[in-house]
Image: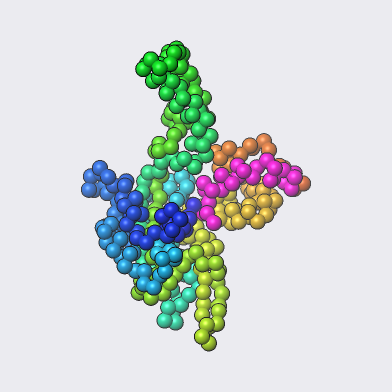
Amino acid sequence: MYITITAQKLGGDYSQSSADFVKYLEKENEGLEQENVEHFFNQYGDEIEAKEVVKEIDGNTAKLKKKEPKFYSITVSPSQSELRKLQNNSEDLKKYTRAIMNDYATSFNREINGKPITVNDIKYFAKIEHQRTFKGTDKQVKENQPFATKILQLKQDIRKIENGKLEGDIKKMKTQISKLEAEAPHQQNGKRIVQGMKKEGNQSHVHIIVSRKDASNSVSLSPGSKYKASEVEMHGKILKRGFNRDAFFTNAETSFDKTFAYKRNYAESYKSKKDFIKNPKLYFTTLLGLPASEKAVVFKILAKSGVPMASIPTSQVQVALKTLRYLKRGVEVAIKSSSIGI
């Protein structure tokens, strides 16, 4: 599971309206028959229109300054293994979204009118998407770029030859292009991966727009708070503050496992990511100490991400010496693709 929470920005400034973001999330519905359209939904409602989402989010910003986020985006991206556990992608992801928004609410160390925050205090709208495309920042696109540059130059030279502006062997150049296309390190269905290409396989994920203000438009609730969970005295009163991201990510993972009876391997757990960041030696020692069946799954996850299996150390001494030197970069990719993001 990979979950991110970000404040929506437009360039260097925070978006003053959710309209552009909502329009972006509607792109996948273009050209679809009505029965195949994915609508926005929230904790209790389905088939909510885009214009209603914009109206509700934009109208819930009382007393927020121009330089403060008006809303946050939560992206929930299950791994391929997790998606295979779902019986019906759309309905199951709706069910899971509603479960983790309960987790989101309880992660605030705040009270409204003397009561702990619940999901009823959160104004949010969510939308499921089933496609993803490769971005220019993706490893596959970046590592294919040198080949793309050479191919583009050859194509430009061919056009110049055809227009009489350059001399050369077009047939030979086309052969070079075919060779470069085949030699590019990252391919999908026999074609060089390029920016904008749709990713194969099940790519279902969820986008959530959540208002910075509570449902009553009176209390500011920021998941970007630098305070985890603390108390502060203000005007003679003790006030609770903060959002516990660690608790949210942990509970979101637990909610998925309980909801869909998912048996999570250590390598794809949120705990493993924390171990890897804070104590790489512990991370690899734990991997090597797993039962044989779990270890096999771990190695499969790591191998798919390009981690050199022959370099995995077999003793604690080797762990200390080789962990960061040989494996860290590849394991970071594996963790990012299979775990909840921090």
Q: Is residue 48 left or right of residue 68?
A: left
Position of residue 97 measured from the top left corner of the image (x, y, whole percent)? 40, 59
Q: Would residue 260 be seen by someone viewing this image from the given angle?
A: no
Q: Is residue 287 above or below residue 124?
A: above
- Tell me where residue 45 appears, x and y as whole percent: 29, 63
- Could you say which quadrant of the image residue 62 lies in? bottom left
Q: Is residue 66 above or below residue 286?
A: below
Q: Please tell me which residue is depicted at 51% across the width and 85% down the height of the picture.
A: 235
The residue located at (40%, 38%) in the rendering is 196
- Seen in the picture, residue 115 relative to 25 is either above or below; the reply is below
How far from the left and from the top, in percent, is residue 268?
Answer: 55, 50
322 is within the stretch colored magenta? yes
Q: Is residue 340 left or right of residue 174?
A: right
Of residue 209 and residue 188, the one placed in the foreground of this image is 209
> Which region of the structure is painted magenta?
318-342
Main secondary structure of the magenta stretch: helix
Q: Residue shown at 48%/70% (left/top)?
A: 108
Residue 161 visible in the current orientation: yes
In the image, residue 138 sits, relative to residue 97, either above or below, namely: above
Identify the residue at horizontal 36%, vertical 69% (top origin).
Answer: 61
